[in-house]
Image (cartoon, grey):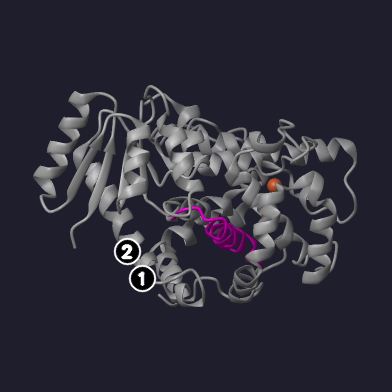
């Protein structure tokens, strides 16, 4: 079926070049161009569009402000949006992801990469469109998860290496990934953010890999020095995911693998961001940076509540699991200071799906049975 794309760039030469290159490869697609974000927004309100490709830097309303409007509006909040950025604009890339960009591509744009990205986003959007967001949408969500299964398994196996304080057979990492994706969906964020969370959230505690086992598994409360060591897992995790030359153990030889710059890879960037900021609190009392409110990246605000709920309802070496009701009471009591109120509200609304994730990946149940049979 023919698709309708809206291309937005204030540079008329680049805009026309983009239009011609896409048209040459996808002649059936309808392509509408806009040289200002505000013009694009007006077009989005008056016609049906299947995807938006937008530059960040534009006079007047910026590409990021347009993205924000798209995600806030009922009519457009699910629209796939590809954001085009300069290579080195790491902060802007992070902001675009926080605002719900479906994908990021560097300028100058590689046509093949753009078309592959658009093909993937349009087919995922088509699947989601065919099923409303209710019980009937579950098979589509699960089908998308199945497509990512082998990557998810790899990520969760790595996460388990770091999670040495957990009970044998614990599936905490995969539950945090699946719950975070479900919560992002409940909040109205697109498939791009849901999938990044699914794959990146399990690595939130990867920094624990460098924390001494006797501290991680200590049955009683930690003393101040031990607590400082444990809190270091955020910085260690972020560096492990961001810096290919970082070696957290003495004697480990770093930098043998040629890695892409983390800033170019939305998955690595999301994982590093979550590892660094998942213990920040809404009122600024968290660590390691003491960030408050919306300064805490959206991904971390989502993962923080899923991680806390799952940890409370899981068995630990030093305590029994809390019941769901008890865990919700604890989260609501500490909620005002610790969690984003909008995320907390959405978490309550997403509880049926979160409960389903807990049942599907209960501790002691093989999380990847198909792969384990091979
Ligand atoms: Fe943590
Ligand atoms: Fe955790």
**Dot 2: within a 10 Å radius of its alpha carbon, few (fewer than 14), some, or many (20 or more) residues?**
few
Q: Quadrant of residue 182?
A: bottom right
- Give the overall secondary structure of the magenta segment: helix
Q: Is residue 106 above or below residue 186?
A: above
Residue drawn at 45 percent across, 68 percent down: 141
Q: In the depicted view, which residue is nearer to us: 222 or 64?
A: 64
From the Cβ of disc 1, is ligand 2 less than 8 Å away? no
Q: How many marks?
A: 2
Q: Is residue 189 above or below residue 62?
A: below
Q: Is 260 a magenta residue?
A: no
* Circle 2/circle 1 CB separation < 8 Å: yes
Would residue 30 appear left or right of 191 to someone viewing this image?
left
Q: Is residue 113 above or below residue 85?
A: below
Q: What x and y, as percent, mark residue 262?
A: 45, 34
Q: Quadrant of the N terminus?
A: bottom left
**Dot 1: within a 10 Å radius of its alpha carbon, few (fewer than 14), some, or many (20 or more) residues?**
few
Mark linked to residue 364: none
Q: What x and y, as percent, mark residue 160?
A: 61, 57
Q: What x and y, as percent, mark residue 355?
A: 65, 72
Q: Is 185 a magenta residue?
A: yes
Residue drawn at 50 percent across, 53 percent down: 189
User: Label 1, on which residue?
Assistant: 130
User: Label 2, on which residue?
Assistant: 126
Q: Is residue 39 visible?
A: yes
Q: In the depicted view, which residue is nearer to us: 130 or 181?
A: 130
Residue drawn at 65 percent across, 46 percent down: 301
Range of magenta residues: 170-190
Q: Is residue 101 above or below residue 246?
A: below
Residue drawn at 36 percent across, 26 percent down: 87
Question: Which element type, helix, strand or loop, lies under badge 1?
Answer: loop
Question: Which element type, helix, strand or loop, lies under badge 2?
Answer: helix
């Amino acid at each position: 079926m023919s698709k309708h794309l809206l291309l937005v760039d204030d540079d008329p030469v680049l805009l026309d070049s983009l239009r011609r290159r896409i048209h040459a490869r996808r002649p059936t697609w309808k392509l509408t161009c806009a040289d200002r974000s505000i013009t694009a927004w007006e077009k989005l309100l008056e016609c049906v569009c299947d995807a938006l490709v937008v530059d960040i830097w534009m006079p007047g309303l910026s590409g990021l402000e347009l993205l924000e409007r798209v995600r806030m509006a009922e009519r457009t909040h699910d629209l796939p949006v590809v954001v085009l950025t300069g290579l080195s604009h790491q902060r802007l890339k992070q902001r675009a992801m926080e605002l719900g960009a479906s994908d990021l591509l560097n300028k100058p744009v590689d046509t093949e990469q753009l078309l592959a990205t658009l093909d993937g986003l349009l087919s995922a959007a088509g699947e989601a469109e065919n099923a409303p967001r209710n019980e009937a949408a579950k098979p589509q969500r699960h089908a998308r998860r199945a497509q990512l299964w082998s990557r998810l398994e790899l990520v969760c196996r790595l996460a388990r290496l770091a999670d040495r304080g957990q009970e044998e057979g614990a599936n905490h990492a995969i539950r945090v990934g699946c719950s975070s994706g479900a919560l992002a969906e409940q909040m109205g964020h697109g498939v791009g953010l849901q999938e990044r969370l699914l794959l990146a959230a399990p690595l939130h505690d990867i920094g624990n890999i460098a924390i001494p086992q006797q501290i991680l598994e200590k049955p009683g409360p930690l003393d101040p020095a031990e607590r400082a060591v444990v809190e270091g897992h955020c910085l260690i995790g972020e560096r492990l995911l961001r810096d290919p030359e970082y070696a957290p153990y003495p004697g480990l030889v770093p930098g043998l693998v040629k890695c892409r710059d983390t800033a170019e890879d939305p998955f690595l960037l999301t994982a590093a961001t979550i590892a660094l900021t998942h213990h920040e609190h809404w009122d600024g009392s968290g660590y390691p940076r003491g960030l408050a409110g919306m300064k805490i990246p959206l991904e971390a605000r989502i993962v923080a509540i899923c991680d806390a709920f799952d940890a409370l309802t899981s068995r630990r070496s030093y305590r029994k699991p809390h019941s769901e009701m008890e865990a919700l009471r604890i989260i609501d009591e500490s909620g005002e200071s610790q969690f984003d109120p909008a995320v907390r509200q959405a978490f309550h609304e997403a509880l049926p799906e979160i409960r389903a994730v807990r049942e599907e990946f209960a501790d002691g149940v093989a999380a990847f049975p198909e792969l384990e049979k091979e």
